Image (cartoon, grey):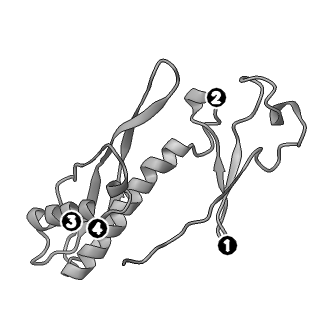
Amino acid sequence: MGAHHEYTVAVSWPASGIEPGSPEAVTSSYTAYTRDHDVALPGRPGIPGSADPAFRGDPGRYSPEDLFVASLSQCHMLWFLHLAAESGLAVREYVDDATGTMRVESRGEGQFTDVTLRPRVVVDPGPRATDEHVADLHHRAHALCFLARSVNFSVIVEPAPLHVAEAAA
């Protein structure tokens, strides 16, 4: 039997700083209440949350949809870096411009249809610094990512061509 990991997150509404009982802190109508909330994890900085702006949220706060796409990107990156280190590939930079598509039905229910990861990596020169090796690492990272394995839609990985850093003079 494998290991089990549990995660604890506290989500509270309304967000700190909003006066309890104020009109925006009461769900008197769909348009009246704030979507702003706080996401707290023990011993870590809080995350200011809100709904997506399309659903009356604050664009200056993180939506669940934003964090969902970010979590898939983070998971892939962390596995990629792990596998690169094990293989002897020195990664200098990793940037991913990930996107997600969510479809909302006419009655309001919705779901993600896909997430696309577009990682760009910069590596040190060496025998492992090949497009083929990096493509294999992305393939393996995708297969190992706990979150990509947990969703019921496609997580597409479209890595940019490998960039090899200039050798130090």
Q: Classify 10 Å Cα crowding around label 2: few (below 14), some (14-19), many (20 and above).
A: some
Q: Is residue 22 above or below residue 64?
A: above
The percent coordinates of residue 97 (x first, y second) are 35, 48
Which amino acid is tagged 4? Phe
Mark 3 Cα within 10 Å, few/some/many (few <14, many 20+)?
some
Classify the position of the C terminus by image quarter. bottom left
Q: Secondary structure at mark 4?
A: helix
Q: Are marks 3 and 2 in contact (CB under 8 Å)?
A: no
Rendered image quadrant of residue 80: bottom left
- Residue sitting nearer the eye, 166 or 7: 7
Which label was assigned to residue 134? none
Q: CA distance from mark 3 to mark 2?
A: 39 Å
Which of disc 2 and disc 3 is earlier in sequence?
Answer: 2
Would residue 163 be seen by someone viewing this image from the given angle?
no
Name the residue located 65 percent from the left edge and 36 percent from the top edge: 58
Residue at the image position 64 percent from the left and 34 percent from the top: 57
Residue 140 lies, with reference to residue 24, above or below; the image says below
Q: Which residue is mark 2?
A: 56
Residue corresponding to mark 4: 80
Where in the figure is residue 94, as x and y percent of width and height?
33, 63
Q: Residue furthest top?
A: 106
Q: Earlier in the sequence, mark 2 or mark 1?
A: 1
